[in-house]
């Protein structure tokens, strides 16, 4: 049984938003989970390789990214490996 646990930053704790955890059997099922699907078509998804793996929502050619969940076993998932990118700030 493989699960994904929703990530919410700690500032959500005071307003009692409950983090959800879902079981899934395939990548298709994973991408249909409501809290993941809510990111819409503006984002692609990627995974970190450490365990538990972080599920990332990625946009802007990889320069904008958010941790949205943790997955305990990524075997069988065909999502790209997430690698951080940062834009160089322009000098004033």
Image (spheres, helix red, strand yellow):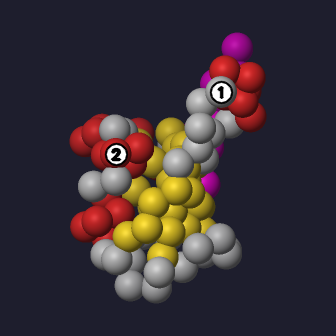
Q: Residue at position x 65%, y 27% from top?
A: 16
x%, y% of residue 46?
45, 61
Q: Is residue 87 magenta?
A: yes
Q: Residue at position x 52%, y 56% from top?
A: 21
x%, y% of residue 85?
58, 50
Which residue is disc 1 drawn over? 16
x%, y% of residue 60?
41, 39
Image quarter of the C terminus: top right
Q: Residues within 10 Å of mark 1 (few under 14, many from 20)?
A: few
State the residue lying farthest toward the top. 92
Q: Is residue 65 magenta?
A: no
Q: Main secondary structure of the magenta part?
A: loop
Quadrant of the rendered structure where residue 76 is? Answer: bottom left
Q: Residue at position x 43%, y 67% from top?
A: 23
The magenta-colored residue range is 83-92
Circle number at residue 80: none
Q: Is residue 90 left or right of residue 40?
A: right
Label 2: which secondary element: helix
Circle number at residue 34: 2
Q: Earlier in the sequence, mark 1 or mark 2?
A: 1
Observer able to see residue 55: no
Q: Residue at position x 36%, y 39% from top?
A: 39
Q: Nearer the viewer, mark 1 or mark 2?
A: 1
Q: How many marks?
A: 2
């Amino acid at each position: 049984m493989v699960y994904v646990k929703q990530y919410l930053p700690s500032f959500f704790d005071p307003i009692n938003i409950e983090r959800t955890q879902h079981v899934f059997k395939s990548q298709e099922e994973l991408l249909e989970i409501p809290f993941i699907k809510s990111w819409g078509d503006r984002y692609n998804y990627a995974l970190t390789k450490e365990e538990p793996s972080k599920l990332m929502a990625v946009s802007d050619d990889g320069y904008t990214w958010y941790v949205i969940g943790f997955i305990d076993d990524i075997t069988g998932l065909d999502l790209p490996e997430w690698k951080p990118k940062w834009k160089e700030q322009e000098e004033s």
